[in-house]
Amino acid sequence: MYRRLVSFVSLLPALAVVRAQSSGPTVDLGYAIYQGAKNSSTSISSFLGIPYAAPPTGDLRFQAPQAPAVISDVQQATAQPNECYQAPFGNATTSSFPLGHTDLSSGGALMRKRDVGQSEDCLYLNVYTPADLSSSTNASLPVLVWIHGGGYVAGGASGFDGVDIVQESANGLVVVIIQYRLGVFGFLSGNEVVNGGGALNAGLLDQTYALEWVQSQISKFGGDPSQVTIWGESAGAGSVLQHIIANGGNTQPSLFRAAMTSSTFLPSQYAYNDTVPEALFAFFANGTGCSTSTTPLACIRNASVDTLESLNNQANLNGFYGTFVTVPVIDYEMIVERPIVTLQRGSVNGEVLLAMTNTHEGNVFVNYAETLNTTSYVENLFPLLPESSVQQVVSAYANYTVGPGGGPAVGDVLGQAIGIMGESIFYCPSYYLLDAFSKSNKSAWKGTFAIPDGFHSSDIPYYFVSVGPAVDNTMFIASFSGAFTGVALAETPDHHPTNVSITPEWTTWPTGEMEVVFNTTEAGDANIYASTTDTVYPGIIERCNIWHSLGQYTGQ
């Protein structure tokens, strides 16, 4: 089952692409000089594994990121960096942590074998630039920062070749792909984290630190720090949402101008000292023998990485099926309130937004082998919902059928669960973002990726084409990816850098609540058209309004 679902966490294999390399360019970052590799046929230089922060190990575990050490020798930047430690998603039939369970030793968690190259020392980024770094006059190109997905527990930079995006932009963008701490290493929360001097949302702070690195360093790679776009898929898109609402939507100085989300991921995001984060902290304290310590955070910090990673796997496996337990929290500093509260006010960082969803986001997160009951499914997915609200949700999905492309029949319990998961955690947060930008008189556009089966993360190969898209239609790929590169280059999806577009003109949200649907015919020809949201996803706006009204209980 895990292998069948690997794609949803964006665990793409490192791309084994053979490229003709010339002598590598060097860049002096002040704390070290890095030598990358230049592809003589594409004129694109790659700098792999640049540390943007010090290794978060030892005393820096669970702390905010710190500046990297100064190194005098020239450092090679030609190998992919270690990934941060990984973990799987929830596999339990019921929700454990919201019920206060902290001893899950009987849960039968299976230790997932770690791949070579996972480490706590993982705060690296890759830079891909078409600029001529040998010139005394550097270019000043727009910059695209990619934040990988993986439920805040998995993923890394090596699965994404930034050369793909540079080429799709006709060598008009500098691309940066970042890594950040995951699982317990990036998202340990609770009162004792604060009392022990630790950092809440360390993984988000890593991302912020990387964006600040871009502001101070990207000009040395030919990039313009005033023209930064942030883009992510799944938890990467959820991270983009977090940066949009950071500091109440008023981050100063600004770290980006444009934001793009592919499958915005907004699971329950509780206050750092709420029941769920406290139960998780207790679980890790118990597992490390630190529950009776007067300084439990310091005690956990001294635990071996193998112990913490084993507990990390166990904690995440014991989450409710298809969910992730080590996720961002409301810390009252960077994230000052529930995300949809900030969005409701129209308080957002960034000037433009492109939001994309897939037609069947929820499918891979629902256990097909489990006998489902809609009421119990809702209760386990959002265990703090009052009974009356549970029944309100059940009623709203009584006649639900999976979106474009078919699926379970109307009234089918499996289809209802898929709809509840997909809409509450992926679709609706995307529409909340769109509404927030519209409310603040900023441009926003909505698109739908509908190539069958339209599952979560099935759009990624159409951005990073060297992975190999299932439908290899040149016109479709150029038009689809061109919307994203257009926003990064010119702050509009109507700008197509390769001049290959079969896309109707985009309409800004919410005029008519229109979105562009990207599909293909059975013959594999492109089928791209504009449609109303209610046609693409009948009744979704009304259902999203219900979820919005229940945000205090869902933790959103």
Image: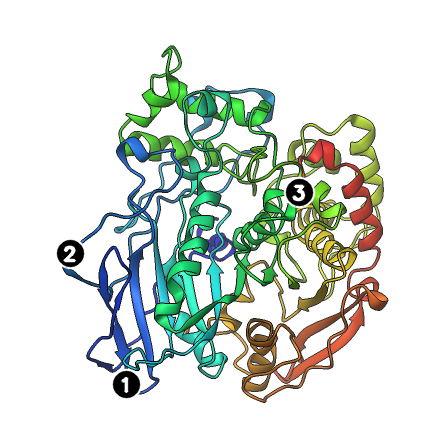
Residue drawn at x 59%, y 23% is: 275
**Residue occupying image coordinates x 58% and y 89%:** 499
Q: Residue at x 56, y 41 (%)?
A: 323
The CA span between labels 3 and 2 is 43 Å
Mark in front: 3 vs 2: 2
Give the x, y percent position of residue 354: 65, 65
Q: Are marks 2 and 1 in contact (CB under 8 Å)?
A: no
The reply, left or right, for residue 33 in relation to residue 90 is left
Left or right: residue 211 versus residue 476 is: left
Residue behind mark 3: 339
Q: Badge 3: how crowded within 10 Å, few (<14), some, or many (20+)?
A: many
Q: Tell me if I can see residue 368 in this picture.
A: no
* 73 to 374, vertically: above or below: below
Q: State which tag comes first along the sequence, 3 or 2.
A: 2
If you read the primary sequence from the N terminus, does the residue marked by circle 2 or circle 1 appear first? 1
Is the C terminus in the top left, top right, bottom left or bottom right quadrant? top right
* Residue 263 screen position, x and y as percent: 61, 57
Residue 46 placement (x, y as % from top left): 31, 71
Instruction: Name the mark on residue 358.
Output: none
**Picture colour scheme:** rainbow
For the point 67% across and 74% down, the residue is 518
First of labels 1, 3 by sequence position: 1
Q: Amino acid at mark 2?
A: Ser
Q: Which residue is mark 1?
A: 40
Q: Residue 545, image x and y in percent? A: 82, 46
Cα distance between the residues tagged 1 and 3: 46 Å
Q: Amino acid at mark 1?
A: Ser
Mark identifier at residue 72: 2
